[in-house]
Amino acid sequence: MPLDKAPRRRVAHLDMDAFYASVELLRHPELRGLPLVIGGRRGHGRLAEYSGRGVITTATYEARAFGLRSGMGLVRAAELCPQAVLLPADFDEYRKYSRLFKEAVARIAPLVEDRGIDEIYIDFSQFGAAQRETALAIKAAVRDATGLSCSIGIAPNKLLAKIASELDKPDGLMLLGEGELAARIWPLPTRRINGIGPKAGAKLESLGIRTIGELAAADPALLVERFGRSYGAWLHQAAHGRDERPVVTVREPKSISRETTFERDLHARRDRDALSAIFTRLCEKLAEDLRRKGYRGRTIGIKLRYDNFETVTRDLTIETHTDDARTIRRAAGECLKRVPLERRLRLLGVRVAALAPAGEVADLFG
């Protein structure tokens, strides 16, 4: 069974291995080989000693062996692996290494689609018989530039390439050829398909569908009946390895944001000084992000999450595009005046939207 209507098309998915944790191990080599968890906002120590709330951002493979995973609450993680070492996330450092690895890849294979801080798709169609050699060169270039390892999956399309990159981790390389769908993909659990989440996976299992092969053999009409016309049809297509999405090398962002979740709930009045400092810092970091990415924006917004988990947002559109921290803070401050501040706060965020390339617009001071 053909995997793709265009058999010559080849797509690579590159995924950095336990990215945040691996960056931290460069700075803390003495922790190598130990179960390590990234999360929370305090200095490092044993996970058993952590008392605040928060979730795991990522974990080393040694920690994953104890059942720890991204998104798990730190309190639950401490029950499973109290001896794990906990480090706070340092996103500025992770963004730096993200830029380094993407620049290294682009020097070898310039047709890249950025999918986040630690993963990219690469159009590999041009490399023909040299796909393995090119992938090995990319892996070596990434290691030289960052000291980190990555895993690469190469397949006829993006859906299959992403699955393939997970099959030989860490530091892996997996080439999926034409005609290998039944042998290599169908035995895998349905959750290996990007787009099948916990709820859909559980619903499929209730129907007796546990593997991708069983999903491929399922009656398409049943899938549409149980999951709706659009998602049900997609499930059938995905199980058969069909994906026509191109590698998109230029993607204009709709907005850029910064937010932080507090270790303890803060009150807008009783914790005014602490909140003001956090608010200013968020605006400063957001302005740095805008300048680094080459954008300015006109719509400034805030996001608040209260102690009862209710979330509110407010936006304000200013006259001219800007990337100036003081201007962003001033506009965001106006937004704050439009929300109730009686409850304690869990989260504070600032965003800039209505973006335009900095070279095409002038800021308020231009």
Image: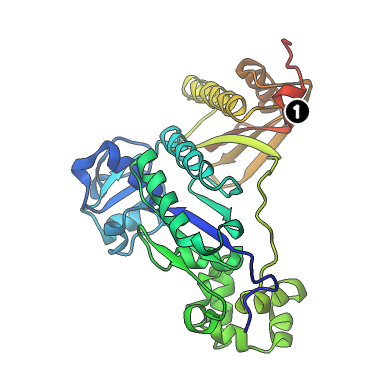
Within-10-Å neighbours for mark 1: few <14, some 14–19, many 20+: some
The reply, left or right, for residue 120 in relation to residue 362 is left
Colouring style: rainbow
| Residue in the foreground of this view, choosing between 181 and 235 | 181
| Residue in the foreground of this view, choosing between 106 and 21 | 106
Percent from the top left, x then y, of residue 194?
56, 65
Q: In which quarter of the image is the N terminus?
A: bottom right
Is 91 drawn above or below residue 17 in the view shown? above
User: Which structural element holds mark 1?
Assistant: strand
Q: Quadrant of the C terminus?
A: top right
Residue shown at 48%/83% (left/top)?
Answer: 183
Percent from the top left, x then y, of residue 263?
41, 38
Is 256 drawn above or below residue 207 in the view shown? above
Res 195 seen here: no
**Total count of labels:** 1
The reply, left or right, for residue 148 in relation to residue 177 is left
Residue lying at the far front in this picture: please name it. 129
Residue type at numbered disc 1: Leu
Residue lying at the far left in this picture: please name it. 30
Residue shown at 57%/71% (left/top)?
Answer: 199
Residue marked by disc 1: 316
Residue lying at the far top in this picture: please name it. 365
**Which of the 4 quarters of the picture holds residue 157?**
bottom right
Percent from the top left, x then y, of residue 121?
57, 54
Residue shown at 51%/23% (left/top)?
Answer: 281
Is 265 drawn above or below residue 112 in the view shown? above
Res 168 seen here: yes
| Residue in the foreground of this view, choosing between 131 and 267 | 131
Residue shown at 32%/57% (left/top)?
Answer: 77
The reply, left or right, for residue 176 in relation to residue 219 is left
The reply, left or right, for residue 340 in relation to residue 306 is right
**Which of the 4 quarters of the picture holds residue 135?**
bottom left
